[in-house]
Amino acid sequence: MSRIVLGVGGGVAAYKSALLLRALTEAGHDVRVVPTAAALRFVGAATFEALSGNPVSTEVWDDVPEVAHVRIGQTADLVLVSPATADLLARAAVGRADDLLTATLLATHAPVVFVPAMHTEMWLHPATQDNVATLRRRGAVVLPPPWDGSPGPTAAPAGCPNRPTSPRWRPSSSTTVPPHCPRTSPAAAW
Ligand SMILES: Cc1cc2nc3c(=O)[nH]c(=O)nc-3n(C[C@H](O)[C@H](O)[C@H](O)COP(=O)(O)O)c2cc1C
């Protein structure tokens, strides 16, 4: 059993974090959910508390005697941030510590994995790409965002091939994939 911190950012994909939490607890892991305030506008704290069996808070001001923002990070085996919004990636890259999740990210020595989810334009913006590069340079794993190849907010970037949804999909050696295109299928990011 691992102690996993599940950070949840304030994107519409936050609903998937409840399913991810369920899968992690069923696999025997002890999961502490640390949502942002924006995340709780999408999924209620009661859902995370019921599924994890652990208390949920967003602020460093909760549970002050325990110094939660330090203890949660220091005792984690893995910090998994899913979904990671553009805003959350930016705050993490800058090193902000203005809520419990970003403070935990600064206090932890555990591996950190970000699972971004956002509109294609937000992902491809140079600001976001710089933030991702910064986080990767510091050792974090930042997965490519999921999208399904269809038109709309989750469309693949212009010039990128549509892909099947198999998690094991990879471009064939004969496929020319521009450098800005993801190398994995959307399902692989979840
Ligand atoms: C309905 C709705 C859906 C949103 N979905 C996303 C999203 O998928 N990705 C994203 O980066 N921001 C999304 N946003 C914007 C974020 O909620 C906003 O940037 C927020 O400040 C992120 O806060 P965080 O740093 O706590 O994640 C969405 C906003 C709304 C109102």
Image: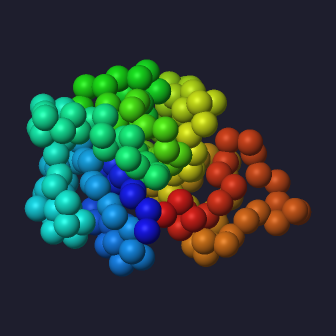
Q: Number of labelled discs?
A: 0
Front in this rendered view, residue 102 or 152: 102
The colour scheme used to paint the residues is rainbow
Q: Residue at x 31, y 34 (%)?
A: 70
Q: Residue furthest toward the right?
A: 174
Left or right: residue 4 compared with residue 48 = right
Left or right: residue 29 compared with residue 156 = left
Picture quadrant where residue 167 is located: bottom right
Front in this rendered view, residue 33 or 152: 33
Q: Residue at x 25, y 47 (%)?
A: 35
Left or right: residue 73 compared with residue 170 = left
Give coordinates of residue 42: x percent, y percent. Answer: 19, 54
Q: Residue furthest toward the front?
A: 65
Front in this rendered view, residue 20 or 171: 20
Q: Residue at x 43, y 37 (%)?
A: 108
Q: Residue furthest toward the bottom?
A: 26
Picture quadrant where residue 62 is located: top left
Q: Is residue 109 above or below residue 8?
A: above
Q: Is residue 27 above or below residue 120?
A: below
* Residue 129 visible, this angle: no
Picture quadrant where residue 95 is located: top left
- Quadrant that contains the N terminus: bottom left
Front in this rendered view, residue 164 or 130: 130
Q: Residue at x 51, y 28 (%)?
A: 131
Give coordinates of residue 146: x percent, y percent. Answer: 50, 57
